[in-house]
Image: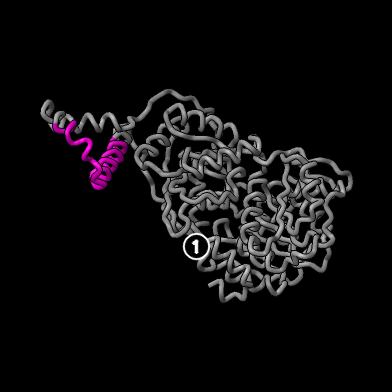
């Protein structure tokens, strides 16, 4: 329980206001160690409560009477930076701690003005933080706590040199916390270089949300994937669903095709403006769209409650991405469902995913058009039964009696069912076929030699050279992917 962790009354007030009741495993282990100013490595997936795990002790140690940056959180994407800053603001509400998010795509002059107001905590993406450091609009010499969130994702995106450059700007007499779902060699090197005798806290995959997610795979030809997806949507009638595609083009085409077939869908990826992405996420959370189509990077770190189904339209190349995707559902004690589409050539990837999650996927036979229609009929019947139970029918009884005087009861009910049922739409759609994943021999990511590869792709992808100030040229959604070997 939080009250057993020695937190201040102001912090307990914020925790109560946020609706937190019992500390998660990562929080129960991390908070006491962090309050003792120990360096810490937290190995945990998104959805385990790690933002509060580092945010609560970070806020506790802030001296709000000192107008200087005392804490910095480095996050891989602007969405995650915004989400973390929002949660830190809530955690620090009782103490009135000032939190400022800094990320690319936002007016830099506006950020400079905000920095002059002396926030207590900065949450930023590596590229924009380096930009401010180089402009001398951001000084980190008062920072007492540095936090690297989703460090493995920052490695995948080519930010490893940025991280090193940022940490080099912070006093060595600081506390450093590093959170990462996996611990590849380059991340271990950062820990050895920049941390002092770090304590290690691990939350195993089986303790994360995977155990509460029913996992299925559907073997299907590339050209038939979309029809199978829409039939599953018709049969399963998800309250909120996320469909994951491998590329930005895939996301755009899928969201457009789903709308053509009568579903309320929108896509999110790195090419959209920040305002558009936030607008899409707001509509999804409010329920005005019921299908979100996303790339891995755009959806990483999103904390969206109520997702009932995840559809992996394209199987990801690495098992960590798979775990992250299906972790969007099965939260807060609820069960979720994840369906993964695989072509015959990609079946070898299932075994590696299953070994990572320690859970066997059940094969799902692609539904037929008749089954999809039957699924929609069942959904309508369920609504009718719920309406009968509500018993607000007095204003409709007379019209019903008159109708039954003219028609056979089963004919009337059949007509109602037909009128209310969303019949499966067969509007032709055309999706650009994605190349199947390469068939390679299996090998664990970051086995011997991968460290060298990591340095190579940093150079190839244009990671900034801090001696020359050269600018990164690669895009968030074009990150290099780990492949099974």
* Residue 251 at least partly seen: yes
At x 50%, y 46%, the residue is 348
* Residue 193 at least partly seen: no
Residues 258 and 290: in front is 290
At x 52%, y 40%, the residue is 283
At x 75%, y 46%, the residue is 458
Find residue 111 and report its image quarter: top right
Q: Residue furthest front?
A: 395
Decide if residue 211 is on the left or right side of residue 45. left
Q: Give the colouring mode of the picture.
A: one colour
Residues 371 and 222: in front is 371
The picture places residue 373, in percent across and down from the top left corner, at 30, 33
The picture places residue 266, in percent across and down from the top left corner, at 52, 35
Where is 276 relative to 23, above or below?
above
Q: Which residue is mark 1?
A: 206
| Magenta span main SS | helix
Where is 265 relative to 465, above or below?
above
**Helix, strand or loop status at disc 1:** helix
Q: Residue furthest right?
A: 467
Asked if residue 413 is among those painted magenta in the image, a careful observer would answer: no
The picture places residue 197, in percent across and down from the top left corner, at 74, 72
Tell me which segment is drawn in magenta.
374-401
Decide if residue 392 is on the left or right side of residue 298. left
At x 64%, y 63%, the residue is 94
The picture places residue 277, in percent across and down from the top left corner, at 60, 39
Asked if residue 385 is among those painted magenta in the image, a careful observer would answer: yes
User: Crowding at label 1, few (<14), some or many (≥20) Cα neighbours within 10 Å?
Assistant: few
């Amino acid at each position: 329980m939080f009250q057993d962790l020695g937190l201040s009354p102001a912090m307990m007030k914020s925790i109560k206001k946020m609706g937190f009741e019992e500390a998660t495993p990562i929080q129960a282990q991390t908070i006491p160690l962090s309050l003792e100013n120990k360096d810490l490595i937290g190995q945990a997936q998104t959805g385990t409560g790690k933002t509060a795990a580092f945010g609560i002790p970070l806020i506790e140690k802030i001296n709000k009477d000192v107008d200087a940056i005392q804490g910095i959180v480095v996050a891989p994407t602007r969405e995650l930076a915004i989400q973390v800053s929002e949660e830190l603001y809530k955690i620090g509400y009782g103490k009135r701690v000032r939190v400022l998010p800094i990320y690319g795509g936002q007016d830099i002059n506006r950020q400079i003005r905000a920095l002059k107001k002396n926030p207590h905590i900065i949450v930023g993406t590596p590229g924009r933080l380096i930009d401010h450091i180089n402009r001398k609009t951001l000084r980190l010499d008062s920072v007492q706590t540095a936090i690297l969130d989703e460090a493995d994702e920052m490695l995948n995106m080519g930010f490893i040199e940025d991280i090193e450059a940022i940490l080099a700007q912070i006093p060595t007499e600081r506390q450093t916390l590093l959170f990462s779902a996996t611990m590849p060699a380059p991340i271990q090197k950062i820990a050895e270089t920049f941390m002092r005798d770090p304590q290690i806290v691990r939350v195993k995959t089986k303790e994360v949300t995977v155990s509460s997610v029913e996992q299925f795979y559907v073997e299907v030809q590339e050209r038939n994937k979309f029809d199978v997806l829409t039939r599953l949507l018709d049969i399963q009638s998800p309250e909120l669903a996320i469909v994951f595609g491998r590329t930005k083009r895939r996301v755009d085409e899928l969201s457009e095709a789903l709308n053509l077939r009568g579903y309320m869908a929108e896509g999110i990826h790195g090419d959209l403006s920040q305002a558009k992405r936030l607008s899409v996420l707001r509509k999804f959370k409010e329920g005005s769209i019921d299908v979100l189509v996303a790339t891995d990077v755009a959806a990483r770190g999103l904390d969206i409650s109520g997702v009932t189904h995840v559809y992996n339209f394209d199987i990801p190349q690495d098992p960590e991405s798979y775990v992250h995707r299906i972790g969007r559902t099965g939260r807060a004690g609820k069960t979720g469902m994840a369906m993964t589409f695989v072509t015959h050539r990609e079946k070898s990837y299932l075994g590696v995913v299953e070994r990572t999650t320690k859970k066997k996927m059940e094969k799902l036979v692609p539904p037929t058009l008749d089954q999809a229609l039957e699924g929609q009929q069942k959904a309508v019947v369920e609504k009718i039964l719920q309406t009968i139970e509500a018993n607000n029918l007095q204003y409709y009884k007379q019209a019903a009696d008159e109708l039954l005087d003219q028609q056979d009861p089963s004919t009337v009910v059949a007509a109602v069912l037909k009128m209310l049922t969303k019949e499966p739409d067969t509007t032709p759609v055309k999706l650009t076929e994605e190349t199947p994943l390469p068939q390679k021999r299996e090998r664990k990511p970051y086995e011997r030699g991968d460290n060298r590869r990591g340095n190579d792709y940093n150079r190839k992808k244009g990671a900034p050279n801090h001696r020359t100030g050269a600018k990164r040229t690669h895009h968030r959604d074009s990150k290099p992917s780990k492949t099974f070997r």
